[in-house]
Image: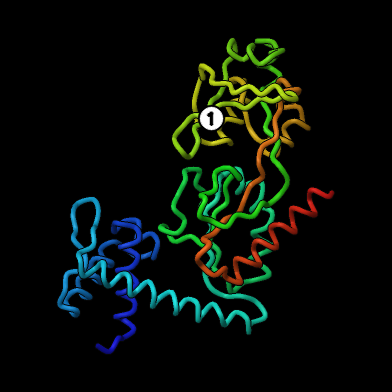
Amino acid sequence: MKLSRSDLGDLNVFMSLARHGGFRKAALDLDVSASAMSHALRGLEARLGVRLINRNARSVTLTEAGEELLVRLETGFGEIAAGVEGLNRYRSSPAGRLRINVLSDAARLLLAPVIADYTTAHPDVHLEVMVQDRMVDIVGEGFDAGIRFGGRVPEDMIALPVGPPLKWMMIASPDYLAEHGAPEEPDDLRRHRCIGLRMGTGAVYRWELEQGSDIRLMNLDWSVVVSETALAVEVAQRGGGIAYCLHGRVDACLRDGSLQEVLPAWSSDGEAFHVYFPSRRQQSEALKIFIAMLRHKLTISTAG
């Protein structure tokens, strides 16, 4: 069978469907409509004379023929991608697509200062940053790299720290503390309105308080639980209670006095953010440069 441009495009549609397990996510990945993907797949199956996918209302599964084809396509398309990527060695600046999945905290603290500089310096790289606090399979969902807290990186990935260890602290508004009093020790938090944060794993984060060798894990009677740091901070600013967050997210608010640190002797240090990527996949030039720029920017900012 001689492959046309249309055949290659439809085979890519099939691979995306297999990777995402459904038309909706695959359509978002390829930036086409689900109906267009369905039409392309039907055309491919008709030309091949073989059903590749079993469809139902919510998801798709591969037939035996589809499973066999997918194995070969992943090898073939992987070689094509490696060949195209290899051409970046002959370019003054890389080209291609770079997709990164990142925590909301890391997006604000790490990426925001770098993205503009990167896209200006490397205009031929199509950069996509997906901000998600839930854990995702970056390989299965088509990302080149992810950024998470050091202890949350999957073990089968290569991980590099970006930035220094992270300082965690408790904060509240001056009005809240004036009305309710400032806690003097960790157990006093049980009498306060505390704002819980639900992590990407689905669990509510237990506050980690540390004073020398004394470490406390606080699972409190949360007055409200949110899934985003920015919202927790805003609730605290409005007098809604005590929140627990990274120092970098509230540094400006502490300086202008709209927030105050609570129990400063019990702040704790956590692992740095880590950028991670698959160990079995050759790192692209676009990603190498992005990581180098990210680490350089952080080195300058922390040195200052």
Q: Element type at marker 1?
A: loop
Residue 209 percent location from the top left of the image: 66, 25
Residue depicted at 57% across the width and 75% down the height: 95
Of the residues shown, which amino acid type is indicated by label 1? Tyr
Q: Quadrant of the N terminus?
A: bottom left
Residue 244 percent location from the top left of the image: 62, 28
Residue 167 percent location from the top left of the image: 70, 35
What colouring method underlies this structural image? rainbow
Q: How many marks?
A: 1
Residue 226 percent location from the top left of the image: 50, 30
**Is residue 161 rendered to the left or right of residue 231?**
right
Given residues 212 and 244, the one toward you in this image is 212
Establish if 63 lies above or below 59. Answer: below
Q: Which residue is tagged 1? A: 205
Given residues 206 and 231, the one toward you in this image is 206
Establish if 131 lies above or below 141. Answer: above
The answer to which quarter of the image holds residue 88 is bottom right
Residue depicted at 65% across the width and 10% down the height: 180
Residue depicted at 60% across the width and 69% down the height: 286
In the orientation shown, which residue stands out farthest toward the bottom? 2
Given residues 19 and 231, the one toward you in this image is 19
The answer to which quarter of the image holds residue 168 is top right
Label 1 Cα crowd, 10 Å radius (few <14 / some 14-19 / many 20+): some
In the orientation shown, which residue stands out farthest toward the right? 304
The answer to which quarter of the image holds residue 114 is bottom right
